[in-house]
Protein backbone atom coordinates (compact mmCIF):
# COMPACT_ATOMS: atom_id res chain seq x y z
CA UNK A 1 0.00 0.00 0.00
CA UNK A 2 2.79 2.44 0.90
CA UNK A 3 4.63 1.66 -2.34
CA UNK A 4 1.43 2.27 -4.31
CA UNK A 5 0.91 5.67 -2.61
CA UNK A 6 4.55 6.54 -3.20
CA UNK A 7 4.19 5.76 -6.93
CA UNK A 8 1.11 8.00 -7.14
CA UNK A 9 2.98 10.80 -5.36
CA UNK A 10 5.91 10.50 -7.77
CA UNK A 11 3.51 10.54 -10.73
CA UNK A 12 1.83 13.74 -9.48
CA UNK A 13 5.23 15.36 -8.95
CA UNK A 14 6.28 14.44 -12.48
CA UNK A 15 3.07 15.89 -13.92
CA UNK A 16 3.53 19.08 -11.91
CA UNK A 17 7.15 19.52 -13.03
CA UNK A 18 6.20 18.87 -16.67
CA UNK A 19 3.34 21.40 -16.55
CA UNK A 20 5.52 23.98 -14.81
CA UNK A 21 8.28 23.58 -17.39
CA UNK A 22 5.79 23.84 -20.24
CA UNK A 23 4.39 27.12 -18.91
CA UNK A 24 7.87 28.54 -18.28
CA UNK A 25 9.04 27.47 -21.72
CA UNK A 26 6.19 29.28 -23.44
CA UNK A 27 7.26 32.62 -24.80
CA UNK A 28 5.08 35.46 -23.61
CA UNK A 29 3.94 37.83 -26.36
CA UNK A 30 2.68 41.13 -24.92
CA UNK A 31 1.57 42.33 -28.36
CA UNK A 32 -0.61 39.24 -28.72
CA UNK A 33 -1.82 39.84 -25.16
CA UNK A 34 -2.81 43.37 -26.12
CA UNK A 35 -4.77 42.01 -29.09
CA UNK A 36 -6.60 39.50 -26.87
CA UNK A 37 -7.31 42.25 -24.34
CA UNK A 38 -8.61 44.62 -27.02
CA UNK A 39 -10.86 41.93 -28.49
CA UNK A 40 -12.21 40.42 -25.28
CA UNK A 41 -11.56 42.59 -22.24
CA UNK A 42 -11.45 46.25 -23.25
CA UNK A 43 -15.22 46.59 -23.49
CA UNK A 44 -15.33 46.43 -19.66
CA UNK A 45 -11.69 47.18 -18.76
CA UNK A 46 -10.65 50.00 -21.10
CA UNK A 47 -7.56 51.67 -19.66
CA UNK A 48 -7.48 49.20 -16.79
CA UNK A 49 -10.79 50.37 -15.38
CA UNK A 50 -13.98 48.39 -14.72
CA UNK A 51 -17.28 49.69 -16.06
CA UNK A 52 -19.34 47.18 -14.06
CA UNK A 53 -17.59 47.32 -10.68
CA UNK A 54 -15.69 50.57 -10.30
CA UNK A 55 -13.71 49.29 -7.31
CA UNK A 56 -12.42 46.21 -9.20
CA UNK A 57 -10.01 47.89 -11.59
CA UNK A 58 -6.90 46.37 -13.11
CA UNK A 59 -4.65 48.89 -11.39
CA UNK A 60 -1.68 47.37 -9.59
CA UNK A 61 -2.67 48.34 -6.06
CA UNK A 62 -6.20 47.00 -6.58
CA UNK A 63 -4.97 43.73 -8.09
CA UNK A 64 -2.52 43.33 -5.20
CA UNK A 65 -5.21 44.11 -2.63
CA UNK A 66 -7.48 41.48 -4.17
CA UNK A 67 -4.65 38.92 -4.43
CA UNK A 68 -4.93 39.06 -8.22
CA UNK A 69 -1.47 40.41 -9.07
CA UNK A 70 -0.13 37.18 -10.55
CA UNK A 71 -0.56 35.17 -13.73
CA UNK A 72 -2.24 32.26 -11.95
CA UNK A 73 -4.99 34.35 -10.40
CA UNK A 74 -5.70 36.24 -13.62
CA UNK A 75 -5.70 32.99 -15.59
CA UNK A 76 -8.23 31.48 -13.18
CA UNK A 77 -10.43 34.58 -13.48
CA UNK A 78 -10.32 34.54 -17.28
CA UNK A 79 -10.96 30.79 -17.47
CA UNK A 80 -13.76 30.62 -14.88
CA UNK A 81 -15.20 34.12 -14.66
CA UNK A 82 -16.47 35.49 -11.37
CA UNK A 83 -19.33 37.72 -10.30
CA UNK A 84 -20.23 39.85 -13.34
CA UNK A 85 -17.21 38.76 -15.38
CA UNK A 86 -17.94 35.90 -17.77
CA UNK A 87 -15.59 33.01 -18.43
CA UNK A 88 -13.66 32.96 -21.70
CA UNK A 89 -13.42 29.23 -22.49
CA UNK A 90 -12.64 29.75 -26.18
CA UNK A 91 -9.30 31.44 -25.51
CA UNK A 92 -6.28 29.18 -25.91
CA UNK A 93 -3.81 28.65 -23.07
CA UNK A 94 -1.36 30.82 -25.00
CA UNK A 95 -3.95 33.61 -25.35
CA UNK A 96 -4.72 33.50 -21.64
CA UNK A 97 -1.03 33.54 -20.67
CA UNK A 98 -0.39 36.45 -23.01
CA UNK A 99 -3.35 38.51 -21.80
CA UNK A 100 -2.54 37.81 -18.14
CA UNK A 101 1.02 39.00 -18.65
CA UNK A 102 -0.22 41.99 -20.63
CA UNK A 103 -2.54 42.99 -17.77
CA UNK A 104 0.29 42.66 -15.23
CA UNK A 105 2.65 44.64 -17.44
CA UNK A 106 0.13 47.42 -18.02
CA UNK A 107 -0.81 47.62 -14.36
CA UNK A 108 2.86 47.86 -13.39
CA UNK A 109 3.39 50.86 -15.71
CA UNK A 110 0.12 52.55 -14.82
CA UNK A 111 -1.98 51.74 -17.88
Image (cartoon, grey):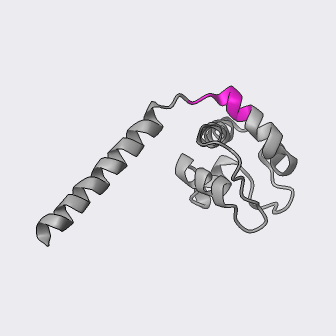
- Find residue 11 and report its horizontal and vertical position in percent: 27, 54
The image quarter containing residue 81 is: bottom right
- Find residue 51 and report its horizontal and vertical position in percent: 87, 56
The image quarter containing residue 57 is: bottom right
- Find residue 14 and report its horizontal and vertical position in percent: 29, 48
Question: Which one is in front, 59 or 90?
Answer: 90
- For the record, the magenta segment spans 28-34
- Find residue 6 and report its horizontal and vertical position in percent: 17, 62
Question: Which one is in front, 103 or 17?
Answer: 17
Would residue 78 appear left or right of 21 to someone viewing this image?
Answer: right
Question: Which one is in front, 16 or 29?
Answer: 16
Count the marks: 0
Image quadrant in which the C terminus is located: top right
Residue at figure coordinates x 72%, y 53% from the top left: 88
Q: Residue furthest bottom?
A: 1
User: Is 12 placed above or below 25 here?
Assistant: below
Residue at figure coordinates x 56%, y 59% from the top left: 67
Residue at figure coordinates x 63%, y 39% from the top left: 108
User: Is 49 placed above or below 99 here?
Assistant: below
Residue 41 colored magenta?
A: no
Would residue 22 appear left or right of 33 to someone viewing this image?
Answer: left
The image quarter containing residue 86 is: bottom right
Image quadrant in which the N terminus is located: bottom left
Residue at figure coordinates x 13%, y 70% from the top left: 2
Amino acid sequence: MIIYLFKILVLFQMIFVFNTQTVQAAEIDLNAGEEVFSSNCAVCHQGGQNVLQADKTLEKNVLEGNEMYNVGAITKQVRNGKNQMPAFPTLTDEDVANVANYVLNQSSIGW
